[in-house]
Image (spheres, rainbow, N blue to C red):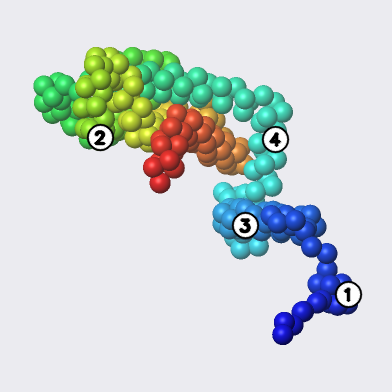
């Protein structure tokens, strides 16, 4: 005897309408997508908040510390943030800040650009030719361990107090970080890649172009980032010693003229400039190294 089981209409209504296999309710998908977006946005906001919290606390301390924590005599030499921003706005309004910034950027970019080109070329040659490395290594070790600012009087005596001495000392400061990282980047190229390229018949120029230089780019850009920061710092110091324009001149002249808010406005401009230079160099590094990320994700 066979029992026949049937579903009542009430049970079917309780279960609800059915969908074809592989499909889901649009409302449920929309709710899931919205929840995922909210979760991602909350995570991004949380990370941004944690990163900016220290900066916000520092700026708040700068604003309220001199007003409520410092003595009146100290407040003269440490003005609150709003006075510094007002001084910076006045410098922008009169055009002084733009003129000094332009002078510093011209010197820094000139010396930095020359140093990067020469350091990359020489670094590739030193890393590739062992005899050249043995020949130049003692001299390079001597100069790279000599403080850059210690040579400022030498450059000033030889080249004068004009633009040449400042561009030269910026180039000297930027040269060695790029050179050493270029050498290290070439030496860390996978030998299997070089042997594979040789087996495919690539000549030396194509080997450098297609294998060695792309593999060394991340390490080279690490040196370029270091050089970008050091070139700005050295230039500011050089402008403080002998210059008639530039951010370094603005800072020291404001200090000697007892324009303390102007001095801090110049210092704040240098900090912002350093952050901007580092941001640009990081973006360039990611652009030129994106093939490595793609290869790493594929191999993973």
| Residue under numbered circle 3 | 43
The residue mark sitting in front, 3 or 2, is 2
Q: Are marks 4 and 3 in contact (CB under 8 Å)?
A: no
Q: Which residue is more in the foreground, 252 or 232? A: 232
The circle drawn on residue 9 is 1
| Residue under numbered circle 2 | 190
User: Is 71 situated left or right of 129 in this image?
Assistant: right
| Residue under numbered circle 4 | 89
Name which of mark 3 and mark 2 comes first in the sequence: 3
Residue 128 location (% of width, % of height): 20, 23
The residue mark sitting in front, 1 or 3, is 1
Residue at 41%, 20% (x, y): give it: 113
Name which of mark 1 and mark 4 comes first in the sequence: 1
Q: Which residue is more in the foreground, 155 or 297? A: 297
Q: Are marks 1 and 4 in contact (CB under 8 Å)?
A: no
The residue mark sitting in front, 2 or 1, is 1
């Amino acid at each position: 005897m066979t029992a026949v089981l049937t579903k009542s209409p009430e049970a079917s209504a309780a279960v609800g309408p059915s969908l074809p296999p592989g499909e889901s309710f649009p409302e449920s998908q929309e709710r899931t997508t919205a929840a995922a977006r909210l979760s991602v946005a909350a995570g991004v906001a949380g990370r941004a908040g944690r990163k900016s919290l220290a900066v916000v606390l520092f700026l708040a301390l700068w604003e309220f510390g001199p007003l409520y924590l410092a003595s009146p005599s100290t407040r003269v030499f440490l003005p609150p943030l709003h006075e510094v921003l007002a001084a910076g706005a006045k410098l922008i309004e009169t055009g002084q800040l733009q003129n000094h910034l332009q002078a510093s950027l011209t010197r820094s970019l000139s010396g930095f650009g020359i140093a990067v080109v020469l350091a990359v070329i020489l670094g590739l040659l030193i890393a590739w030719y062992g005899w050249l490395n043995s020949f130049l290594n003692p001299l390079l070790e001597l100069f790279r361990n000599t403080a850059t600012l210690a040579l400022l009087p030498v450059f000033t005596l030889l080249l004068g107090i004009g633009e040449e001495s400042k561009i030269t000392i910026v180039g000297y400061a930027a040269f060695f970080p790029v050179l050493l990282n270029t050498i290290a980047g070439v030496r860390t190229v996978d030998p299997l890649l070089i042997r594979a390229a040789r087996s495919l018949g690539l000549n030396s120029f194509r080997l450098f172009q297609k294998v060695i230089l792309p593999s060394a780019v991340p390490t080279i850009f690490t040196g370029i980032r270091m050089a970008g920061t050091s070139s700005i710092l050295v230039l500011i110091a050089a402008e403080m010693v002998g210059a008639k324009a530039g951010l370094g001149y603005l800072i020291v002249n404001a200090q000697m003229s007892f324009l303390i808010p102007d001095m801090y406005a110049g210092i704040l401009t240098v900090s912002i400039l350093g952050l901007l230079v580092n941001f640009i160099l990081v973006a360039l590094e990611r652009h030129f190294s994106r093939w490595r990320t793609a290869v790493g994700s594929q191999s993973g």
